[in-house]
Amino acid sequence: QVQLVESGGGLVPPGGSLRLSCAASGSFFSIYVMGWYRQAPGKERELVAMITSDGRSTYPGSVKGRFTISRDNAKNTVYLQIDSLRPEDTAVYSCNAHATRRAGELVTVYWGQGTQVTVSS
């Protein structure tokens, strides 16, 4: 089982920055892709960034240039730096991890509980 715990959310004024963290723990063989998603009230969950185990990152056009994903494989942690925050960035941000618990096992996707980000003056 893989547990993911997000942290770093909060109330931020427009134009501010936040750094979210997501730490993976538990028993696993390997973690492959890790991603950050967000879900605003009344909206579908959307991908905002993902990163492979070798550091290749992908962003949708709506956040490119303001969001930066990174990971520390030694700490099994993925980060999301969000700059120039806008009110429309307000959402619950969750991370996921594509991982295997044993060698040769099929990949399972695990999710964290999420952290609230509110952008308001």
Image (cartoon, rainbow, N blue to C red):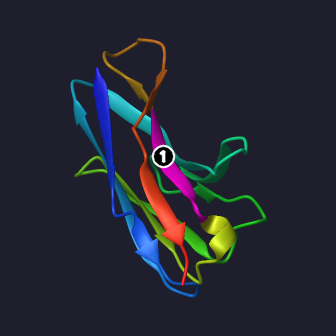
Asked whether residue 107 is drawn in magenta, I would say no
* In this view, 89 is above or below 3: below
Task: Quadrant for the N terminus, please.
Answer: top left
Q: Position of residue 34 (x, y in %)?
A: 48, 44
Segment colored magenta: 90-97
Task: Quadrant for the C terminus, please.
Answer: bottom right
Front residue of this view, candidates 40 and 109: 40
The residue shown at (50%, 85%) is 16
The residue shown at (74%, 58%) is 60
Q: Is residue 66 left or right of residue 74?
A: right
For the image, the number of numbered tags is 1
* In this view, 104 is above or below 80: above
The quarter of the picture where residue 120 lies is bottom right
Q: Position of residue 26 (x, y in %)?
A: 21, 29
Task: Give amino acid for label 1.
Answer: Ser
Q: Position of residue 4 (x, y in %)?
A: 33, 38
The residue shown at (23%, 51%) is 74
Residue under numbered circle 1: 94
Q: Residue furthest top?
A: 105
Asked whether residue 92 is drawn in magenta, I would say yes
Q: Residue furthest right?
A: 61
Q: Residue furthest front?
A: 121
The quarter of the picture where residue 71 lies is bottom left
The residue shown at (45%, 56%) is 116
- Residue 121 visible: yes
